[in-house]
Amino acid sequence: MPEDRRIAVDVRDAVKRYGDFTALKTISLSIMDNEFFTLLGPSGCGKTTLLRMIAGFEDVTEGAIFLFDEEIEDLPPNQRPVNTVFQNYALFPHMTILENVGFGLEMRGKSKSEARKSAGEMLELVQLSQFAARKPSQLSGGQQQRVALARALAPQPKVLLLDEPLSALDLKLRKAMQLELKHLQRETGITFIFVTHDQEEALTMSDRIAVMSSGELQQLGEAREIYESPRNMFVADFIGETNLLEVSVDAIKEGRAVCHLGGGHELTCNEVPGVDVGAKVHMSVRPERLFISDQKTESESLKGEVKENVFAGTDITTIVDLADGPKFTIRTSNSDRGNKRIFEPGNEVFVNMEQGAARLLVD
């Protein structure tokens, strides 16, 4: 992240309480100008509450929120230079698509002709110009979502807030809209703050991700960092698929931790500050960082037996049960079938892993 970029939204020690219930527990984070930033977490983690606080729909109990260096706590929602796209598109059914997009501009004092011109430009941006005269009911769900985006972008807000806007779409359309949203963000240069519970969606679109749980910020970083180097067990387990193993740290040598998995099996991984010899912690190993062979390799090798193969189109998932130890899930790209042998249930194999694949976690 370049150091000379402005901070668009600065959340400083923000707390939100509803009576005795604390929905957000002292959240601090900075979102940069022209960034696609995602708040990610399970239902009830506080991500939508934080978004609504930025929008002005919820008050801040403690702390402060700044928008481009201006504290916005006392500004009502309609005076904040932000717009929100919700799960339900909230389009006016009696208006045409062009009228829907231009309505907010007229409410802000633009003339009818100016509003129509700007609305037309926004519809062109989202590739819906040919549907300008139609009513919302005549469009598909994906097209309606693009109209909602055009309407929110038309006033050129400094920040666009998106509250799980793709959740009502089917899988194929949702994936297409993910790429379209990222393209729109780059085209407009507007800061996007996106709320989702879908990990793959967050990884696909985001410059940075804030992972939240139970009202707390668990980890903040770029998508690759969050996936490859999870800070704790919650992040490792929530983001993507992983082999989450209980281990005991037997030794630490030259910055490497030797960990016992049970059944006489050992793995080494990078030492983690705060984890000492004798500690019982967890380790994360991504399934795609593992491969199976009928012999040991120079890297980490663990002996086991194939229990199951699951074909999933692009991938084949193999379950291997270590002797007197844990199970491992290994994922192999379907395109690798010609290069890698597919072992059948009952075959004795060695589970091998890429260097640096095992990540020790601070629980």
Image (cartoon, rainbow, N blue to C red):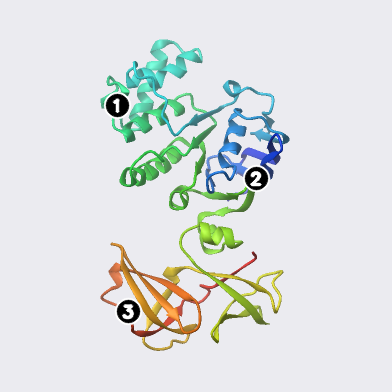
Q: Which secondary structure lies at badge 3?
A: loop
Expressed as whole percent of the image width and height from the top left, the position of residue 115 reads: 41, 16
* Residue name at image x 52 percent, y 61 percent: 237
Question: Which callout, 2 or 1, points to the residue nearer the camera?
Answer: 2
Please tell me whether mark 1 sits on a helix, a strand or a loop. Answer: helix
Choose the circle earlier in sequence order: 1 or 3. 1
Q: Residue furthest bottom?
A: 295
Q: Is residue 253 visible?
A: no
Q: Are marks 1 and 3 in contact (CB under 8 Å)?
A: no
Q: Is residue 161 above or below residue 209?
A: above
Q: Earlier in the sequence, mark 2 or mark 1?
A: 2
Along the line of sight, which residue is nearer the eye, 183 or 234? 234
Amino acid, disc 3: Pro
Per the rendering, the mark at residue 129 is 1
- Give the residue displayed 57% in from the left and 21% down from the top: 78
Reading the image, the residue beneath label 3 is 345
Q: Residues within 10 Å of mark 2 (few under 14, many from 20)?
A: some
Query: Looking at numbered disc 2 in the image, what kind of residue is underneath it?
Result: Leu
Q: Amino acid at mark 1?
A: Ser
Q: CA distance from mark 1 to mark 3?
A: 55 Å
Q: Which residue is mark 2?
A: 29
Asked if residue 265 shows in the view, the reply is yes
> Picture coordinates of residue 82 (x, y %)?
55, 29
Instruction: State the residue in front, 309 or 94.
Output: 309
Image quadrant assignment for residue 262: bottom right
The reply to whether discs 2 and 3 touch (Cβ–Cβ < 8 Å) is: no
Q: Give the answer, above or below, for where 304 lies relative to 238.
A: below
Image x and y of residue 99, in percent: 36, 17
Residue 42's x, y, as percent? 53, 48
Mark 2 and mark 3 lie on one chain; the one further toward the N terminus is 2
